[in-house]
C-alpha cells in the first residue's frame, strides 16, 4: 500500500480514460507518476507542452520533508511556472511529483489562462467521492 507523503493516510488509485492517479482523500493531495502530469492536463483539454517543458527543465531547490511514495527518499522542492511559479515536491530519481490540494489548478493556470477551471472540473470528475470543503 502506498501512503500519502503529506499526511500518511493510504493513497487511493483513481483511473479514468486510461490515466491513473494516486489521490489522498484525507488531505486532497495527488501523486502523479512521471508522465502523468502530461496525461492529466491533456485529458482536461489543456495543451500540456509548456508544463512538460518546464518540468523537464525544473531546477531542484532544497529537500522538503515529504518522501517519494515510490522510493521513500525525501523529495525536493521545485517551482513550476512563470515568475515565482507554484512550489511542489518532486522526486530527484524521477518517479513523479506531489501536488497539494489545489496545486494542480494553480500550475495549470500559471501556464495557460483559463486552464484552472478545466483542470478543476476534470479532477471533480476523477475524484467523485471527494468531500469538498469550502
Ligand atoms: Zn494525505
Ligand atoms: Zn522516488
Image (cartoon, grey):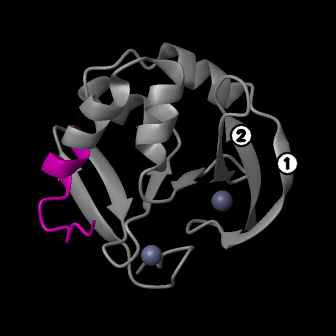
Residue receiving disc 2: 79
Between residue 22 and residue 24, name the one nearer to us: 24
In the rendered image, which quarter is residue 12 located in?
Answer: bottom left
Between residue 41 and residue 102, name the one nearer to us: 102
- Where is residue 131 shown, x and y percent of the image? 19, 72
Q: Is residue 107 above or below residue 112?
A: below
Disc 2 secondary structure class: strand
- Say the numbered circle drawn on residue 111: none
Q: Going 56% across and 69% down the picture, which residue do you hit?
A: 69
- Where is residue 94 shown, x and y percent of the image? 67, 46
- Where is residue 20 shown, x and y percent of the image? 30, 50
Q: CA distance from mark 1 to mark 2?
A: 8 Å
Name the main secondary structure of what is drawn in magenta: loop
- Ligand 2 resides in the quarter of the picture at bottom right
Q: Is residue 29 above or below residue 103?
A: below
Q: Going 37% across and 71% down the picture, which residue do you hit?
A: 24
Q: Earlier in the sequence, mark 1 or mark 2?
A: 1
Q: Please report contact status of discs 1 and 2: CB closer than 8 Å, yes or no.
A: yes
Residue range highlighted in magenta: 122-134
- Where is residue 53 shown, x and y percent of the image? 62, 19
Decide if ligand 2 comes within 8 Å of the CB at mark 2: no
Q: Is residue 24 above or below residue 17?
A: below
- Say the numbered circle drawn on residue 61: 1
Residue 124 belongs to magenta span: yes
Q: Going 42% across and 59% down the picture, which residue do you hit?
A: 101
Quadrant holding the C terminus:
bottom left
Residue density around tag 2, few if under 14, some if 14–19, many if 20 or more, within 10 Å? many
Residue 68 belongs to magenta span: no
Quadrant holding the N terminus:
bottom left
Q: Going 51% across and 82% down the picture, which residue do you hit?
A: 7
Amino acid at each position: 500500500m502506498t501512503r500519502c507523503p503529506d499526511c500518511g493516510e493510504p493513497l487511493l488509485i483513481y483511473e479514468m480514460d486510461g490515466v491513473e492517479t494516486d489521490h489522498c482523500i484525507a488531505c486532497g493531495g495527488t501523486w502523479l507518476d512521471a508522465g502523468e502530469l502530461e496525461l492529466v492536463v491533456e485529458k482536461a483539454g489543456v495543451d500540456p507542452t509548456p508544463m512538460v517543458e518546464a518540468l523537464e527543465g525544473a531546477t531542484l531547490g532544497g529537500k522538503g520533508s515529504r518522501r517519494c511514495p515510490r522510493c521513500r527518499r525525501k523529495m525536493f522542492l521545485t517551482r513550476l511556472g512563470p515568475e515565482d511559479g507554484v512550489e511542489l515536491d518532486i522526486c530527484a530519481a524521477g518517479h513523479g511529483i506531489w501536488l497539494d490540494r489545489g496545486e494542480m489548478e494553480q500550475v495549470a493556470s500559471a501556464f495557460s489562462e483559463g486552464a484552472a477551471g478545466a483542470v478543476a472540473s476534470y479532477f471533480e470528475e476523477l475524484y467523485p467521492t471527494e468531500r469538498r470543503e469550502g
